[in-house]
Amino acid sequence: MGLFSFFTKEIAIDLGTANTLIIHNDKVVVDEPSIVAINRATGKLVAVGEKALMMNGRAPENIKVIRPLKDGVIADFQAAELMLIEFLHMMNAKQRTLFPPGLKMVVCIPSGITEVEERAVRDSSEQAGAKEVRLIHEPMAAAIGIGLDVLEPIGNMVVDIGGGTSEIAVIALGGIVSNKSVKTAGDEFNADIEDYMRREHNMSIGERTAELIKINVGSALSDVDNPPPRYEVKGRDLLTGIPKAISVSHHEIAAALDVSISQIELAVLNALEQTPPELSADIYTSGIYLAGGGSLLRGLDKRIHLKTKLPVHVAEDPLKAVARGTAIALKNFDRFPFLIR
């Protein structure tokens, strides 16, 4: 086994719309934004991850900045392949690997994915060097990462709010009993903030600025514990075309995000309606578990609690919950029944 490990490297990949995490030997070896910059003339990769993110909205005409994943699935196959290959090179460079071994991968995918989209993920992984690929649904990976025993005959509800999709699933006996996948998540929150700034303040801002507003003053409720201070936003005045700065409060952002959060609440209620009565009884006791970057939105747990009247728990490290669960599934490659071959 020791000799075999020289020729095979086991890695878990959370291939997210906003961020990609790669775990090897229980360590996060790559944690980068899922974005690439490509030279339009040559088609060659200019930058990937954090460096490419810094170019977003700032790049000259000859450089195209692409997010290969949209709504949780691969939208640009070639860019996704280039991104994965570069991330794997980064991992090997950090570990000073002279001869890159064959890769055995577990990659997480949205629960509402089609067969064609699933094949795109598998093909991209194989083109990036994987000798063996298995897939796991995001809510299942999130449940494992949170620390739930998914093989027990006990129902647990997991809500994973990522960049492209929000995955809501009721899990029991190693399977997803009922699930709902909606394309309302972090990217939609950013779009809501951009639209709000345009509509209410006559200011044009970019995607990166909207993300920073969400992080600094994003809120699901107007009334939250420890409210953040007002945040200064710089952008272009739509009336004069001149750059300007204004400050926004969490009250404004709560109003901007209200409709999108209501859609997530509705999806949670729909998933609860589809849940068998015995599992509903379990969820009444255990509550709802939140994971993904979107669960960090201030007051979101409280808002879902007010809507469902159920206990709501936020994962200890929600950004890495899916990646951790994928890594645990990798260790049990042949034992877990929910790994898609």
Image (cartoon, rainbow, N blue to C red):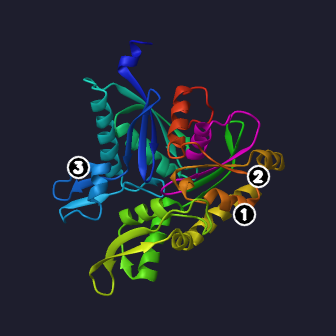
Q: Secondary structure at mark 1?
A: helix
Q: Callout 1, which amino acid?
A: Lys
**Nearest to N terminus: mark 1 or mark 3:** 3
Label disc, if present, on residue 275 of the rendered structure:
2
Q: Give the label, 1 or 3, closer to the camera.
A: 1
Residue corresponding to mark 3: 45
Q: Amino acid at mark 2?
A: Thr
Which residue position is annotated with label 1? 307
Crowd class of label 3 (few under 14; some 14 to 19; many from 20; radius 10 Å): some
Q: Position of residue 157 (x, y in %)?
A: 69, 48
Please say whether residue 38 is one of the residues in the magenta stretch: no
Q: Is residue 281 left or right of residue 52?
A: right
**Is residue 322 visible from the viewing direction of this image?**
yes
Residue 248: image x %, image y %?
45, 72
Write down the quadrant of residue 128 in the picture. top left
User: Closer to the camera, 50 or 38?
Assistant: 50
- Looking at the picture, how far across and down is residue 172, in whole percent? 72, 40
Q: Which quadrant holds the N terminus?
A: top left
For badge 3, the amino acid type reads Leu
Contact, mark 1 vs mark 2 (Cβ under 8 Å): no
Of the two numbered discs 1 and 2 on the same chain, state the one appearing first in sequence.
2
Q: Position of residue 90 (x, y in %)?
A: 30, 36
Q: Which residues are magenta?
A: 138-165
Q: CA distance from mark 1 to mark 3?
A: 46 Å
| Residue 187 visible in rendering | no
Q: Circle 3 — which element? A: strand
Q: Is residue 336 above or below residue 179?
A: above
Q: Nearer the viewer, residue 152 or 195?
A: 195
